[in-house]
Image: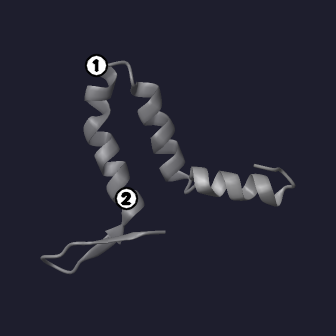
Amino acid sequence: MGIVTDVNTGDGHRLADDTLRLLENVAASADKVGATSAIEALRLQVKHGHDEAQNMRDFVAEGGSL
């Protein structure tokens, strides 16, 4: 879990929260260019805390080979 720190105030918040906020901001534009499903996939990935690196680690841990 990453933390983003505001350099002016020193306040910190989760990178995931910042990313979800940004995804909400681009959702309307994504819809205009047909990228709604991509934004939704990213949103779900961030919300559930799983990323491609974790997916690969899980795959290898289960006996898979890259």
Position of residue 27 measured from the top left corner of the image (x, y, whole percent)? 31, 33
Position of residue 22 measured from the top left corner of the image (x, y, whole percent)? 29, 47
Give the class, few, some or many, for how many residues have Cα within 10 Å of label 2's Cα (few <14, many ≥20).
some
Answer left or right for 25 relative to 9: right
Position of residue 49 measured from the top left corner of the image (x, y, whole percent)? 55, 57
**Which is nearer the eye, 55 or 23?**
55
Q: Between tags 2 and 1, which lies in front?
A: 1
Q: Earlier in the sequence, mark 2 or mark 1?
A: 2
Dot label at residue 17: 2
Q: Which residue occupies 32% across, 57% down?
A: 18
Image height of 42 relative to 62, above or below: above
Q: Which residue occupies 48% across, 51% down?
A: 46
Q: Secondary structure at mark 2?
A: helix
Residue extending furthest right? Answer: 63
Image height of 37 relative to 19, above or below: above
Q: Which residue occupies 50% across, 51% down?
A: 47
